[in-house]
Every structure is written in structure tokens, then in C-alpha cells.
Amino acid sequence: MNNTPPNYTIAFYNIENLFDIENNNLINDNDFLPTSRKQWTKKRYENKILKLGSVISKIGNDNNETSPILVGLAEVENKKALSDLINSPDLKDENYSYIHYDSPDERGIDVALLYKSAIFKVSHSETFSVYLERENGEQDYTRDILLVKGELNNEKINVIVNHWSSRREGIKETEFKRIAAANVVNSVIKSLKKDDLDAKIIVMGDFNDNPNTKSIQLLEDESLLFNPFKTVWSYDNGSSSHNFQWQLFDQILFSTNFFDPNNSKLAFHNAQVFNNKFITQQQGRYKGQPFRTFVGQKYHGGYSDHFPVFIELKPS
């Protein structure tokens, strides 16, 4: 009989516009209403909830017996959507709780953290804003950065969840926005280390930048984080595809003390993109890419335009 405790899976997943079907006048959710061009009906919403639940329940290695302990999410509208998600058929017995704050993002899409409250004991959570300005001097509102403090395997852990500004207006033109976000994360980590020099930190998110970019390098250099996804990303492996090229915007970085067996009850084991066949487009032009909910305005009924990513921590 094997008495070795199972590894802890920690995941991140951009779930591509998880909006409920209700109109919220405070945000721009007009694309995701039953009356919109996308015809975001109750049936389509419930199908997406069902599908996302099935993915989250399976993230990890094939030999994993349990779903992830922690799941960072991007592109979720509100607490109703999160509540529906954790109560979906494949997740309801996993007993997830969630942490979510409404951010000032104009589209109303936020980050959140799902966690198994029986295993990860939350002690504190808060959000941090990224201040950006448009060319005309007006504030450009974006997603907040979420910090959650808790305890896993009798080890204090700090989890920082991100969804940085997109590249829509051009990579170079928008780079300053992602660097601004990296600077906020670094200042949060600096504050954490001021309280505890040996703070264990996990930074996850859709950074809208690949592992080799300046913004990610800033996290590594200034906060001394290790990025296992540098070696995961390749010509034929990523978490999303743009112009038929693999990107790895979704990454999980962590402080190097997860490598110290003498000073940690949790040790880094491995990092992967979760790209199982069932969440992959099986035919046509986009074969091999994530099976999406929409391509443009056209409903495909899939999961997301991103694959989840995960790391495993080995308890000692």
C-alpha cells in the first residue's frame, strides 16, 4: 500500500468570458446577453458552466486522483458565475470556495481564486489596482491584482492572481501597461518580504506576455521568482494560439524557496500545459488549438480560447 501523500496541483485558467445572462448597467456586458448578436442564452451559459467544471475537475497529471487545490481564474464576470461554476456537476463534490472582488475593468471581467477550504486555509485577501492613463490623460481602467494569503500543508503561502492588459493595440504600444502591472506585483512582493523575509510566493496569471518578455523578466529579476514555463513553451506547445503560433501567456511563477527541502514542507515537482484531447479542436482550420466557446461572433460551444496551466507541489 502506498502511503505517500499526493502532490498538490495548483492551476490557472483563463475561462474566456464567463458572463451570466443578466444585464449589468455598470459594465459593458452587452455582447453577453440573450438579445445580443452572440445570443448568450441560458442554455449556452449553462453549457459553458458544465464544460468548464469538467475541465477544472481533471486538471493535473493523468494519475491525479483529485482536482487542483487552488485554481486562479481570469475573465469571470461576478460571484453568481463563480457560484454556478463551483456547484456544477463535476465540481460540487470537490467543495471549492472562491475569492472574488469586482474590479473597475470596463468589460467587467475579473480574476478570482477557487480553493478547497478543507485543505487551503485562507487568512487574508485584498486587491491592488494598476494605474494606467490613455494618451488624452484619462484613466484607463484594467483588472485588479488579487492577493490571497493562506496555509497549505502547514506552510504559509501567498498567491497573487493576475490578468494583465491585452496586446490588442499592438505589442510595443501596450507593453508599458504590462510593465506597470509587473511593477505592482513586485511592490506587493516587496511588502510581503518586509513582513517575512522567507515568504513563499506563487504568482499566476494570464500575463498577455510570453516567458521571454520584459514584463515577466521584471518579476524574475526584482522578486527573484522562478518561471518553470520558460522551458515548457515551445514551437508546438503553449496555452493559446495567435495567427497559428503558440503563445504561453498563462504562467505560474514562484519564489525559489520551494526548491529548499530543508526549509519547505512543499517542493516544486513539475509544470505543464493541460491540453488534453477533449478540450482541443479536433478538426478543421483550428485543429489542435483550444476548443473555444466563440470564434468571432460564431458560437462553437467549446470551453475556452486558452488551455489551463498547472504546477505540482510535493509535500514533504
Image: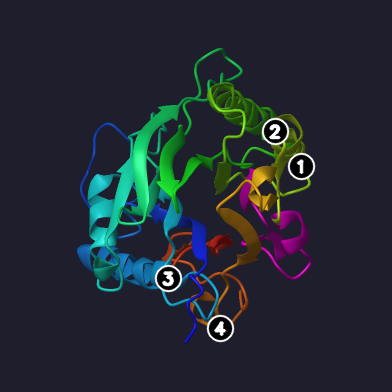
Residue in front for this viewpoint, 123 or 45: 123
Q: Position of residue 304 (x, y in %)?
A: 47, 63
Span colored in magenta: 229-254
Q: Secondary structure at mark 4?
A: loop
Three-letter residue code for mark 3: Val
Three-letter residue code for mark 1: Thr
Q: Position of residue 227 (x, y in %)?
A: 70, 49
Tag 1: Cα neighbours inside 10 Å, few (<14), some, or many (≥20)?
A: few
Q: Residue at x 66, y 44 (%)?
A: 257
Figure quadrant of residue 246: bottom right
Q: Position of residue 265 (x, y in %)?
A: 55, 53
Q: Residue at x 67, y 30 (%)?
A: 179
Mark 3 and mark 1: span between their CA atoms?
Answer: 29 Å
Q: Is residue 242 magenta?
A: yes
Mark 2 and mark 4: span between their CA atoms?
Answer: 34 Å
Q: Is residue 145 visible?
A: yes
Name the mark on residue 213. 1
Tag 2: Cα neighbours inside 10 Å, few (<14), some, or many (≥20)?
A: some
* Location of mark 4 (residue): 282
Name the mark on residue 55. 3
Mark 1 and mark 4: span between their CA atoms?
Answer: 31 Å
Three-letter residue code for mark 2: Glu
3 or 1: tag closer to the N-terminus: 3
* Left or right of 60 in this view: 300: left
* Location of mark 2 (residue): 175
Three-letter residue code for mark 4: Gln
Residue 21 versus residue 58 in the image, above or below: above
The C terminus lies in quadrant: bottom right
Residue 1 versus residue 42 in the image, above or below: below
Q: Position of residue 190 (x, y in %)?
A: 61, 24
1 or 2: tag closer to the N-terminus: 2
Tag 3: Cα neighbours inside 10 Å, few (<14), some, or many (≥20)?
A: many
